[in-house]
Structure formats: C-alpha cells, structure tokens
Amino acid sequence: MELNTVKLRFNDFKDSWIKTKFQSQCLKISSGKSKIEEYGQFPVYGSTGKLGYTNDFTHDGNYILVARVGANAGQLNCVQGKFGVTDNTLVIELENEDEFTFYYYLLQSINLNKFIFGSGQPLITGGMLKSLNILQPNIRVERQKIADFLSSVDKKISLLKEKHALLTQYKKGVIRKLFTQDIRFKDDNGNAFPDWEIKPLSKLADKNSFKNKDNAVNAVLTNSAKCGIVNQGDYFNKDIANQGNLTGYTVVEKNDFIYNPRISVLAPVGPIKRNHIGQGVMSPLYTAFRFKDGNVLDYLEQYFNTTMWHRYMHSIANFGARHDRMNITSADFYALPLPMPSDAEREKIVDFIKALEAKVSAVNEQIELTQTFKKGLLQQMFL
C-alpha cells in the first residue's frame, strides 16, 4: 500500500491516506433485474433515479447505484431501504454498508465518465469499478466527517432545488391567472383598468416573408421548444442546413417572433418564440412575423410561453399524414386571437412577471454556485 495526502482536510486529522483498489471495499457489484410496474410497494431505481414500483424488492439496506449502459452511463445515486433496480444499473454492495455515503462521494470525485467505453452503446462494468485506484483516510472517523460535511452541502442543494421548483410552480400558476384575468391590477389611483380586447394576430403583426437572396445571410437559426431561438450549429453541434443553398430561407431580425409547427412534449402545438439573437435565416417551414408596436413584445412573449393559445391551434389544425407537425393555413394562423389589456395594465403585468422571473433566476444561480462549490470540494478533498 502507498501513503498519500490531499489538498483539503479537517484539522483534526494528520495521518496519511491509504491508496488501494475499490475492490477492497466491495462485497459485491451486480446488475439489477427488476421489472418496472406502475404500482407497487417498493420503488424501482434506474440510471436516472426512481422509475416506477414493484411488489418484489431485490435489495434491502444501503447501496450505491451506477448507471451501467447508455447516455447516462457512470451516473451515480445512493439509496436506502427496500427497493428494486433495473438491469441498466449496477448495484454496489459494500463491506461496511453504513459507510456508503463516503464512498458515494469518493466515486463522484473520480468522474466515472472517463472509464466508459463503446461508441454505439456507452458502457461501464463492475470489473472496471473494482479495479479503480482510490485514496481514502485510514481512520473511520475522518471518513464519516467527510461524508457528513458533503451531505450537508447536498442537503443545501436539495433545499434550493425544492425552493426553485415551488417558485417555478407558483410563477406558472400566477401567470395563468393574470392572462385569464382572475388576477387584475388597478391603476395608480386604485381604479380598475379598462376591459381587455381580443385582437387577431393579423391586426398586430406583419408576416415576414423576406427571403435570403444570393445567400447574403448565412447565420442559420432554429426554434427550440426548450431553448428558444438559437444558433443551429451550437444547438445541434453541427450545421444541419446546406450552407451553400440558403436562398429559400427566411431572413429574420432581432425581436421577430417565429412559430415552429413541429410538435414535441414541451410544445404540444409547436413553440412560438422571440428572436433575441439578431439577424439570421430560418427554415421556410417556420412562420416568422413582426409586431407593429414594439411595446407589446415583452407582454406577448410571456403570453406565448403559456398554453393559453393552444386550444385555438388544436381547433384549426389538420394533422393529416404528418402526426408530428401541425398543419395550419396561413389565414387560420394569423386569425389567432390575442387578449390585449391597456398599455398601463400590460406594463404592470410584464413588470410583475419579470420580478417573479428574477426571483426564480436568483435561486437557480444559488444552485449553480453551490454545485460549483461542491465540485471544488470533491476535487480538493479527494485525489
């Protein structure tokens, strides 16, 4: 055995750490075999966490789980109690199962992704895990102190994520009530604002049909339901469009809105997103339009982030043979009814939503900072 030290330690301990094989701590590493059921008494875990239930648990105690195969290969989880495990996950049973938290963090510090092999189907094996060189304190009390400290950091991250989820849900509910007018603002004198008007999109916006003549613009943008308007090369990690023939593409400018008729889980009628990037070209399959009044952009961007307009889209769609794409005529699309409050009330709505978004973003920033802090700890508390 070999004696070593690490960069960051608790002051109570001075003994050198011991370098050995992870196998020395393992009683067994095996693949799961549970089938997922919709209902059951015990949870079933897979590579991404709890996937379902079972009435027949296969493990009882404290274990470390490692995603064995696929895109999540190398991902770690630690679980306690009675549970089942799918066959795409390795189960690590330790000699001293009450120390599973320490070894869970130790494995996190190693970054198992670098041991994955196989280009078609990424894979990590139990044998690879057993052969890992690990550095650990020789004193159990130090191992426990490290585990407790890192657990407290994870607890903070968990609480911040819970707060973020609650704020996000609250924001979503309040925004819906704002657009359904269940919540109304009053003017600065405490008086009610005028009734809202329903205006068709055609009255508020002009269709953008400016084509990319002579390939003058070559920045290809795409409309992602998750990320909004993004550079195609950055989003797909490669250029999908034929850079030599973009003449049929539509030239869009900053603050244009784009509708993508492609259906997805995140966008069941296709997304409408605002272009915050700048000039670029987009597929002619998309519908691009430009609002006549720049003062409505923030308000309508928030409206299109809701599902309030989805019912109308479903009512006019002809799905035909392409079940993954909305088939809507231009006339029907531009007849889309939009609820429009007065300028003053619209401004209050936008300010309120932005204040909510700032709170959600602040918590998200705290999560990212704490995760970065934890990553630094793992790099310095282990080798």
Image: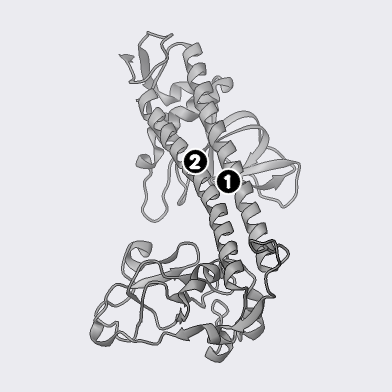
Residue 6 sits above or below residue 168 on the image: above
Q: Callout 2: few (<14), some (14-19), or many (20+) C-alpha neighbours within 10 Å?
A: some
Image quadrant for the N terminus? top left
Question: Disc 2 and disc 1: Cα gap in Å?
Answer: 9 Å
Q: Which mark is residue 44?
A: none
Residue 308 lies, in percent from the top left, at 65, 71
- First reached walking from the N terminus: tag 2 or tag 1: 1
Locate residue 266: give its quadrant: bottom right
User: Which residue, given by chain and number where applicable, does mark 2 sit on?
Assistant: 367
281 sits to left or right of 10: left
Question: Which amino acid, by three-letter code, is at mark 2?
Answer: Ile
Q: Is residue 292 visible to us here?
A: yes
Residue 85 sits above or below residue 251 on the image: above
Residue 354 lies, in percent from the top left, at 53, 57
User: Which residue, given by chain and number where applicable, does mark 1 sit on?
Assistant: 164
Question: Looking at the image, which residue is at 48% across and 78% down?
Answer: 293
The reply to whether dot 2 and dot 1 touch (C-beta < 8 Å) is yes
Question: Looking at the image, which residue is at 39% across and 79% down?
Answer: 283
